[in-house]
Image (cartoon, grey):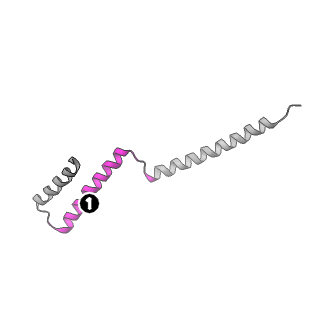
Amino acid sequence: MSKSKLVIDRLAKLFEQGLVSYKDLNSEILNILRSKRDEIIFKMKLASKEEIEILNKRIENLEKNVEKLEKKFNKKKTKKAK
């Protein structure tokens, strides 16, 4: 309830300042909503798309390295002593 009150208070402040023009009002509402969205994303500690792509590449490289090591280990294990 307090978060919705915050948005309503900001809108009321806009009307008090005399921003009645549709474009001004529209841009101010969008700015308020964007800032709230950014705050929520920051609180959730979400990673950006670029960070996720980098992490995926690192995981793929690690998986390849693990497969190579498994192949080496399996080859050494299957050798028989003379």
Q: Is mark 1 on a helix, strand or loop?
A: helix
Say which quadrant the C terminus sits in. Answer: top right
Q: Is residue 57 above or below residue 69?
A: below
Q: Percent x, y for residue 51?
A: 46, 49
Q: Percent x, y for residue 1?
A: 21, 48
For residue 44, side relative to residue 81 (left or right)? left
* Predominant SS of the magenta segment: helix
Q: Name the residue under label 1.
A: 30
Find the magenta span and give its range. 20-49
Q: Which amino acid does label 1 sit on?
A: Leu
> In the depicted view, which residue is nearer to us: 5 or 57?
5
Of all residues, the one furthest to the right in this rendering is 82
For residue 44, side relative to residue 23 (left or right)? right
Of all residues, the one furthest to the front in this rendering is 1
Identify the residue at image location x=43%, y=48%.
47
Q: In this view, does 25 lie above or below 57?
A: below
Quick check: is 2 in the magenta stretch? no
Quick check: is 41 in the magenta stretch? yes
Identify the residue at image location x=21%, y=67%.
23
Identify the residue at image location x=19%, y=50%.
6
Q: Percent x, y for residue 37?
A: 31, 53
Identify the residue at image location x=30%, y=48%.
39
The number of numbered discs placed on residues in the rendered structure image is 1
Of all residues, the one furthest to the bottom in this rendering is 22
Q: Residues within 10 Å of mark 1 (few under 14, many from 20)?
A: few
For residue 76, side relative to residue 33 (left or right)? right
Q: Percent x, y for residue 50?
A: 46, 52
